[in-house]
Amino acid sequence: MVTDFQNIFVFSISTVEVIANVLVALLCGIIIALIYKYTYRGLNYSASFTASLILLTMITTIVIMVIGNNLARAFGMVGAMSIIRFRTAVKDASDIMFIFFSLSIGLAAGVKLYSIAFFGTLIVGGVHLVLNKYNFILPQSREFLLQITALNSQLPDSPFIDEFKKYCRRYKLVNVKTLGEMENEVMEFSYYINLKHESRGKDLVMQIKKMSGVKSVNLFFDED
């Protein structure tokens, strides 16, 4: 019993196993990074973050091999890591998911659970690709922000309503702002709209631009 208890604190790993673990982590990390690059829909794509996913997977594997089953090393590693302060805010929830994805695969590779590392990468990555391809989590009708800048003196009563009824399922005025003074003051109107057909958003913009007094029209939507 004493011998078995002492063996808990003994951990040996060969050079071949070290290389194998790191290579598995590298391959899985590349797959994760490619999935992230292919499915990213935000406006601030970061190549350094994509590369970091690969390195994070490998580093996690190395950390697990260093710790092994040695409690002293584990506590020492926790103390060393507590010194690090991460000051970069992660704004996208999918970025956080990919960070944990890389950490999990790195853990599996570090303890030589290669099947879990490979199949975990393929299954989780495949599910993410399917959800992304078929827009599973997006609402059927997205909400757009329409901003119209126009001369107040040239606008008719209840402007834009006819066009909204033609192109939109729903529309709501959320903000009216004055951009100028004097008699020809410029007004900015902000509407939340749901289009009947999203492909006809440009047609709505063109029709409103043709109206008397309209200076500019902008249609915004969030791809995330």
Image (tube, rainbow, N blue to C red):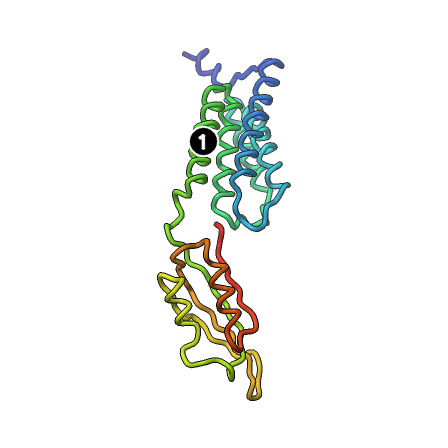
Residue 131 relative to residue 55: left or right: left
Circle count: 1
Q: Which residue is mark 1?
A: 126
Q: Quadrant of residue 151?
A: bottom right
Could you say where residue 102 lies in the image, as x and y percent from the top left?
52, 33
Q: Residue at x 60, y 21 (%)?
A: 23
**Quick one: 175 or 91, which is closer to the camera?**
175
Residue 146 relative to residue 46: left or right: left
- Is residue 104 in view? yes
Residue 136 relative to residue 94: left or right: left
Q: Residue at x 53, y 78 (%)?
A: 213
**Quick one: 91 or 68, which is closer to the camera?**
91
Could you say where residue 70 lies in the image, as x and y percent from the top left?
52, 23
Could you say where residue 130 lies in the image, as x and y percent from the top left?
43, 35
Q: Residue at x 41, y 71 (%)?
A: 173
- Is residue 73 in view? no
Instruction: Identify the element where label 1 is drawn.
Output: helix
* Image: 171 above or below 15: below
- In the image, what residue type sits under mark 1? Gly
